[in-house]
Image (cartoon, rainbow, N blue to C red):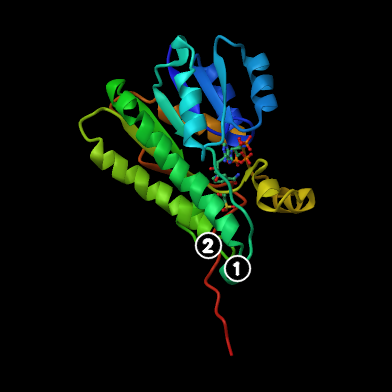
Amino acid sequence: MKTALVTGATSGIGEACARAFVAAGWRVIGTGRRAERLDALKAELGADTFHAAVFDVRDEAARDAALAALPAEFAGIDCLVNNAGLALGTEPAQSASLESWKTMIDTNVTALVSLTHKLLPALVERKGAIVNLSSVAATYPYAGGNVYGGTKAFVHQFSLGLRSDLAGTGVRVTSIEPGMVETEFTLVRTGGNQQASDNLYGGANPMTAEDIAGTVLWVATLPAHLNINTLELMPVSQSFAGFQVARG
Ligand code: NDP
Ligand code: 8X3
């Protein structure tokens, strides 16, 4: 039985990944700050297959304590799903909050890098897999995407760099780059504005967390000689628009 560690399993894509991996016969360590949600997932999925690890990904001491306390059967990690992340705000850079920028960098970049660094030796030993959640925002800039897009571009390029360094180890690395997925993402981004979230997803037939979880599971369970480097997904309703021109 293989084990996946999924960061950000209290909601959205991470929660769907936990369900998908367990349904496929994996053990899952699910992480997040909201203990009650992880407890509910544990009650649903069973303590034999789901372990709740409650910590803020930015808190390395709390993370290390949670990893050190893993039950023996969850201690060998075969797949790291670096999913925990967020966008904060849609303001233009010139009026954005520096605190929000730092929170996005600390969460989406620094914490992801730090956890990956921590688990790499074990992943090499087990010829494991790393699946990183980037975004279409890594490639396509949009107004108000500033630092969020920058963090996801980092995740994309870090994933490719990892592949280079891991040559010959058998460890697989993938950058998953979704467009619009209906989760709590927009609620978080707007500071809890349900109307803004409903307006964005309403009538758009967006992707679901389950769509992305199915893709993450597919990537992680491909034959061992195959590596998906990057995988970009959008709902059919979402596509590209042209450049803007400021006149006058
Ligand atoms: P959600 O807001 O639904 O879920 C985010 C998850 O990240 C939660 O479980 C949350 O847990 C966790 N998280 C955030 N900050 C921290 C922290 N400091 N410490 C621990 N856990 C944290 O959003 P999504 O499921 O949509 O997002 C998952 C990933 O997918 C993110 O990296 C996002 O950037 C990416 N993505 C999302 C897209 C979308 O359209 N929804 C599109 C492309 C990429 P908790 O709050 O309990 O700590
Ligand atoms: C989230 C997708 O398009 O809202 O990463 O930036 S988008």
Q: Amino acid at mark 1?
A: Pro
Q: Nearer the viewer, residue 145 or 139?
A: 145
User: Residue, x 50% and y 56% (percent of image)?
Assistant: 149
Relative to residue 243, is residue 139 depicted above or below? above
Residue 11: horizontal and vertical position, in percent? Answer: 64, 34
Please provide percent x and percent y for residue 70: 48, 17
Q: In the rendered image, which residue does mark 2 sit on?
A: 146
Q: Position of residue 94 (x, y in %)?
A: 58, 71
Q: CA distance from mark 2 to mark 1?
A: 7 Å
Q: Element under label 1?
A: loop
Residue 204 against residue 172 in the figure, above or below:
below
Check the image and name the residue furthest to the bottom.
248
Residue contact between numbered discs 2 and 1, judged by CB atoms under 8 Å: yes
Residue 9 vertical placement versus 235 (above, below) = above
Q: Is residue 135 visible?
A: no
- Residue 198 left/right relative to 78: right
User: In front: 234, or 79?
Assistant: 79
Q: Amino acid at mark 2?
A: Asn
Q: Position of residue 3 (x, y in %)?
A: 45, 18
**Where is mark 1, residue-wise?**
92
Mark 2: which secondary structure? helix
Dot 2, how many residues are within 10 Å of its Cα: few (below 14), some (14-19), or many (20+)? some
Location of the C terminus by quadrant is bottom right
